[in-house]
Amino acid sequence: MIRLPRVIGALLLGATLGASGAALQYVFANPLVDAGFLGVSQGASFGAALALVLGGGASALFGSAFGFALLALAMSVTMASRIRFGGAVLRLILSGMAVSAFFSALVALLKYGADPLSTLPEITYWLMGGLSGTSWKTLMVTSPLALLSVATLISLRWRTALLSLDEATASSLGARPRLERSIVLAAAAAGVAAVTAMAGVVAWVGLIVPHLARIALGGEGSPAVPGAAVLGAGFVVLCDAVSRGLFPGELPLGVTTSLIGTAAFFALLASRRVNVERG
Amino acid sequence: MRFEDVSYRYKGESSMAVAGFSMELKQGSVVALLGPNGSGKSTVLGMGAGWLRASSGSVQQDGSVAFLPQTERLAFAFTCVEYVSFGRAPHLPYLALPSRDDEERSLGALAAVGMENRARRRITALSGGELQLVRIARALVQEASYVLLDEPSDMLDPAHVATIGTTIRRLADSGVGVLLSTHDLGFAIDTADEAVLMREGTILATGRVAEALECAALGELYGTPFRMASIPTPARQN
């Protein structure tokens, strides 16, 4: 049985991950990043695991995952402002890595102490990502945030593409890189935090879909963000169908997207369709 | 654009990168900054562009400024016309996309540097010389009162250098003030009206290019002897 909330959840999840991936790649001037680089996914993982250990309901899980995702982003941004070397982008990536590792360690700690018969499998299953728990109720909470995030990222698309130019160049064109980067980061992170709190960690969509969009649209620039939103929505609906249909039980969505995503990633890099940098 | 007793010190450095620098850039003229590596040319341009804030002194300008840093990291494969259109950003409201008119202007700027047939090519697929011309087109489409160029002829072949020189002269003739840094003395002589010779952050000499760029001054500037040379004309065979 295909349930409507589940399909809507898949569309929202894919659109948010795709649009935020494309936007963040511009902001970081790096075509090989997504929201995971800001610590957002690991923060959400810890929040969810904590709620499962403490035994809250579905809304406690959502709130905790969302809150810790934003906390992780805030930690990444604060740490980046304290690092004494490197440009703004390198500092954010370094601090994002550290914050991700920190929350991974906390998740491991929670798993270590969790009841191996009840809580541990729950945590493990949630971390693999999936939409089986999506209901009208979860959508009511997730969709306003996700839609607002996608709409913001789409309306900022050209300014965001401009931020991928050098900081000196962007400022000479009247941009305020620091402020504008923060706006895009906040919009992307809020959306990703919301959909991650709903569906768990669904990896590789934000990284791979923007590249597929660029190839499909034959260009860079303003169409990439909306293109990634549309393609991301389609990609996740497809992956969710594969997850449900391919095996008698159900494959976790995060496993399916990772399997397809990594294969697509290697195919892309091998085909030289990804223009990473000159030379 | 007027630099008045401007100084700049980079964070963590003990010495001034630029000290007591004063000059005026008039609209319609081309001024070349010359000097050894590290003499403060790029710092002066950065302050003129508003990218660096002078530690002391002031930079005043009565119009908009376009700035081309020496190098630029290009992480994405924009088409040339998409890339040049970014030059329209100062003319657009915050959330607006470039209009048809902006695209027409961008195509016009590409045509002005002879790159109109590259408009739909990706910037990552261009040669170094072509990329520099496209970057200059981006500065042109900004339609600024002043254009600051950091080593625009760096590492280019003579044909591209000539195109860039012609473009800069045309820009100045249309009333734009151009300040550029270069190590290419021939390019400076062909393109600039005035030269500012800089060493260790201060001005050594200024003047009309023809007078300022003579062997003794250049020798002092770069710390190496200069002599006049011209390419010998081959003897004509009858």
Image (cartoon, coloured by chain):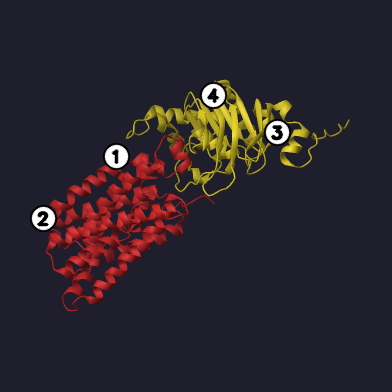
| Residues at marks 4 and 2, CA–CA distance in whole angstroms | 61 Å
x and y percentages locating residue B133 in the rendered image = 55, 36
Provide the letter of the chain coloured red. A
Residue at the image point whose x is 32% and y is 56% from the top:
A75
The foreground one among A33 and B204 is B204
Frontmost residue, A144 versus A106 = A106
Q: Confirm whether circles 2 and 3 share one chain.
A: no
Where, quadrant-wise, is the C terminus of chain B in this rendering? Answer: top right
- Tell me the amino acid under the disc marked 2: Lys
Reading the image, the residue beneath label 2 is A137
Distance between mark 3 and mark 1 Cα atoms: 47 Å
Disc on res. A53: none
Q: Is residue A268 left or right of residue B184?
A: left
Label 1 – label 4 distance at C-alpha? 34 Å
Which residue does the numbered mark 3 point to in the structure image? Answer: B186
**Image mark for residue A155:** 1
Query: Is residue B116 in sight in this rendering?
Result: no
Residue B229 location, x and y as percent? 80, 35
Q: Earlier in the sequence, mark 3 or mark 4?
A: 4
